[in-house]
Image (cartoon, rainbow, N blue to C red):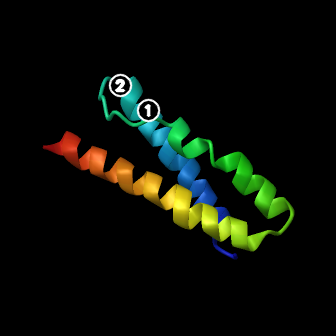
Amino acid sequence: MSILPNVIDGLQWLVEAVQGIQQNGCNLSITIASLTKHFEELERALEVRDYVLTADLFEYEITPTLEEWLKKVKLTEQ
């Protein structure tokens, strides 16, 4: 839990980086909302200290989304 603020900052930075890349004409075919839709639920889980839900969100929602983004970036590189 001690590194969670850094993780959330990193996710925010990633979203901003993808938006910036897309605004500069590179089509990554990444939908920002596919990640940001989980942020409100993550915030609520943290407010009520529901660490099981927090872990589930990272494992089953956020991580798979990031893995999909990585695949799309790798396809763009080719």
- Is 18 located above or below residue 58 in the figure? above
Disc 1 residue type?
A: Gly
Asked whether the residues under the numbered discs 1 and 2 touch, taking CB atoms below 8 Å apart as contact, a structural biologist would say yes
**Which residue is drawn at the image coordinates 74% and 72% (left, top)?**
51
In the drawing, what numbered circle is on residue 24?
A: 2
Q: Nearer the viewer, residue 6 or 41?
A: 41
Relative to residue 45, is residue 58 drawn left or right?
left
Q: Nearer the viewer, residue 51 or 16?
A: 51
Relative to residue 61, is residue 27 drawn left or right?
left
Element on which disc 1 rests? helix
**Which residue is drawn at the image coordinates 35% and 25% (left, top)?**
24
Q: List x then y, in percent, for residue 53.
A: 71, 66
User: Which residue was labeled with disc 1?
Assistant: 20
Relative to residue 69, is residue 39 drawn left or right?
right
Disc 2 residue type?
A: Asn
**Which residue is drawn at the image coordinates 31% and 23% (left, top)?**
25
In the drawing, what numbered circle is on residue 62?
A: none
Q: List x then y, in percent, for residue 13.
A: 53, 48
Q: List x then y, in percent, for residue 16.
A: 51, 39
Q: Residue furthest bottom?
A: 2
Q: Residue furthest right?
A: 48
- Is 42 located above or below residue 31 in the figure? below
Relative to residue 74, is residue 38 drawn left or right?
right
On-image quarter of the N terminus: bottom right
Crowding at mark 1 (Cα within 10 Å: few <14, some 14-19, many 20+): few
**Which residue is drawn at the image coordinates 13% and 43% (left, top)?**
78
Measured Cα–Cα span from mark 1 to mark 2: 6 Å
